[in-house]
Amino acid sequence: MAVQLPSIFEERMKNLLGIEFESFMNSYKQSPHAGLRVNTLKISMEQFNEIAPYDLRPIPWCETGFYVPHDVKPGLHPYYHAGLYYIQEPSAMAPVELLQVQPGDRVLDLCAAPGGKTTQIAAKLQGKGVLVTNDIHAERTKALAKNVELYGVRNAVVLNESPERIASAFPHYFDKVLIDAPCSGEGMFRKDEDMVKSWEHHSVEKCVLMQRDILETAARLLAPGGTIVYSTCTFAPEENEAMIAEFLNMNRNFAVTDIPKKAGFASGRPDWVRQMMPEKAVAMEAVLDQTKGTARLWPHLLEGEGHYVAVLQHRPGQGLETDQPGVVKEGAMECGQFMEVSEIDADGNKDHSIAASSIAMTKADRKKERLLRMESRESNDRRDRRAHGNKDTSIAGRKGKETGGRKVELGRGRGNDSTSMDPVAIYSQFVNECLELELEGETVCYGDRIYQSSVGAARLEGLKVIRPGWFMGTVKNGRFVPSHPLACALQVREARRSVNLSSADGEAVRYLKGETLNIKEERVMLKEGSAAKGYTLVCVDGFAAGWGKWLDGVLKNEYPAGWRWTSV
């Protein structure tokens, strides 16, 4: 059934598209296209092509993306739960491809939830470099953190912050910045009819205010010579070409990098800015034609939903100061910088995130956070000044210890600190006995929770941090309990003890549902010197899915309750 579009929207698109309008409208009579993207952190393209459970067609603009047949539900396969692919709308894969991320880059995904583009960036980094992923809405960071963990991302930090506060902590730090900007969502009308219903309330004018602030702040986050990719899922010129032209007009040290017009990509439309906003167009005339080099993805020209993408390149030597190494020293954080914020996670347990301890957030402050995208930069600055003036409620921690050349930060939090044993020593013992893993980055211990972080703790001071790094596990009663995110990010060769389950005979699904399995000892694959008893990496067709504890022919299921397979 064709989507019922708002009459105001139809009239505007008719005026803009002219002879293309009929073809555009006919696209709404077609079903939206579904896609999946292979997670090359866990499986190579060659391996996936050998075991792919469906007949898939490649997506032209994403070498790891495929169209999914309409009658297929890829979420109902063990490979999805093992993190081998991410279900993603095809057009949404384009912005990260255009960001051209390379291993070793420092990358920021500024408006990241639920995390599809973050996991795409992570796959391109291949565990090298730094990935900071953020969303301003606390509720949305739950899905963001879960996707980072499910897809085996080791080098990510998850934040719940405003762009302005991130810029204060990471000035001119990132090589690449992705802005998947909050927008009016017109390009998603065919895929999500709720977007149609909310369109009049989520106005173009409100979105423009948010987008302007985000773009300006992104420039302060970018290292000299760096790249910003700005994308929306709307057709409105005010949010697309006009927004980019306004940014270029105010930031002459940036220029548009032309996007090749292939695979159905269409040019940007500066003529629409002149048509709809003639006075504004005159003021931006010197830069407006650059927006021809941006790209529009139209549902009547390609197999995907409506998107807009612009690649903005900074020209070195014209206005950005580099963030010099050593200005904020890695691991230089003093005691008591973080406090613990607990909420109930998907498993029904407390989720001990890390949050800024230097700010006592009142209920009114939290409301301002939710509305921040609609405020001006001036009001944001006033909020920050008020917040920094609040009493410091930080929980003093112990000073960091040097362990294996990596700085370790310890805080009391609410964790179980009853044992006199060093939690880092307990963690190190588990790594030595159960894994063959070279730890990278900084080991951060907060309460009973241990992380490996790609970002020095000093940079996270004062920020609301959901995950400071790869969550490795907890120390409880003198024992280390490995986390599910640790298992998800491992390759089978990195575990000294593993069990492989087949996706073909139902055994893998039983594990994913939380059932205890009978596993003969000869099925437990061991590295030399290891015994069968203990924590075992459980794999699906050779790819890590979670933990089990093997003893006397029984594999006790350690798959987290909130993640379990619930479909029939």
Image (spheres, rainbow, N blue to C red):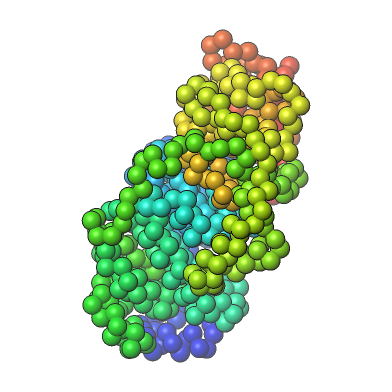
Give how far across and how far down residue 225 sits, in percent: 28, 53
Residue 58: image x %, image y %? 39, 53
520 to 321, vertically: above or below: above
Residue 374, image x, y percentages: 54, 72
Front residue of 248 and 102: 248
Left or right placement of residue 265 versus residue 471 in this view: left
x 69%, y 20%: residue: 421
- Asked whether the viewer can see residue 162, the reply is yes
- Tell me: 313 left or right of 564: left
Front-lying residue, 434 or 290: 290
Name the residue: 60% across, 77% down. 198
Report the quarter where the N terminus lies: bottom right
Pick the residue in front: 449 or 20: 449
Residue 67 in percent (x, y) is at 45, 56
Taking the image as shown, residue 266 lies to the left or right of residue 180, namely: left
Q: Residue at x 60, y 63 (%)?
A: 386
Q: Do we see residue 95 in this rendering? A: no
